């Protein structure tokens, strides 16, 4: 398969990589992303979210940890950052929040991820 083949979406709008992250198949995800690093940035339904957010919504925490190391920060918008944080709270997955501390300045909450030294995931209005 070519890199472009891996970006093909099915009738429901999902790539093979999206399905792998959705069900938490890390070995398959690793195999696919080795062939095409852009897969971590391809958004899919129902919320037009990147694979990191969809894995989080499915409580695939091992996959979330893996995708945190791959997802370009530019792909995370305010909505993604809010979804990541709120889903961690809703699922009682505090390890991600503990290893990625929050810094609050004024009316903004900034999540500082461990995966990219001290760069920021996202800023959002509270």
Image: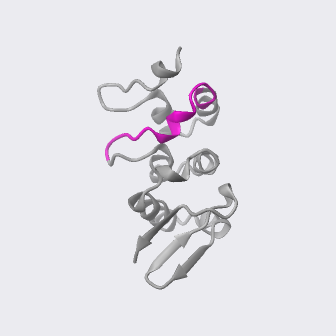
The residue drawn where x is 57% and y is 63% is: 120
Above or below, comparing residue 45 to residue 37 in the picture: below
- Magenta span dominant secondary structure: helix
The image shows residue 79 at horizontal and vertical percentages of: 38, 60
Camera-nearest residue between 61 and 51: 51
Task: Check the image and tell me how it is coloured.
Answer: one colour
The image shows residue 3 at horizontal and vertical percentages of: 52, 21
The residue drawn where x is 55% and y is 40% is: 24
Q: Is residue 17 magenta?
A: no
Q: Is residue 38 magenta?
A: yes
Q: Residue furthest top?
A: 1
State which quarter of the image contains the C terminus. Answer: bottom left
Above or below, comparing residue 125 to residue 88 in the picture: below
- Give the side of residue 14 with respect to residue 96, left or right: left
- Give the side of residue 104 with respect to residue 43, left or right: right
Q: Quadrant of residue 27?
A: top right
- Give the side of residue 86 with respect to residue 48, left or right: right
Count of all numbered marks drawn on residues in the image = 0
The residue drawn where x is 37% and y is 27% is: 9
The image shows residue 7 at horizontal and vertical percentages of: 44, 26
Above or below, comparing residue 76 to residue 10 in the picture: below
Which residues lie in the magenta part?
32-46
The image shows residue 51 at horizontal and vertical percentages of: 48, 43
The residue drawn where x is 52% and y is 34% is: 38
Q: Residue furthest right?
A: 117
């Amino acid at each position: 398969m070519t890199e472009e083949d891996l970006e093909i979406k099915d009738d429901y709008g999902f790539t093979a990589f999206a399905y792998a992250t959705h069900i938490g198949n890390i070995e398959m995800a690793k195999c696919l992303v080795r062939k095409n690093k852009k897969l971590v940035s391809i958004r899919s339904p129902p919320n037009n979210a990147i694979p990191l957010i969809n894995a989080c919504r499915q409580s695939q925490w091992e996959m979330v940890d893996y995708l945190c190391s791959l997802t370009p920060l530019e792909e995370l918008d305010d909505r993604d950052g809010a979804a990541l944080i709120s889903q961690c709270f809703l699922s009682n997955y505090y390890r991600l929040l503990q290893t990625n501390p929050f810094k609050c300045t004024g009316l903004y909450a900034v999540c500082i991820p461990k995966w990219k030294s001290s760069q920021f995931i996202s800023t959002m209005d509270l």
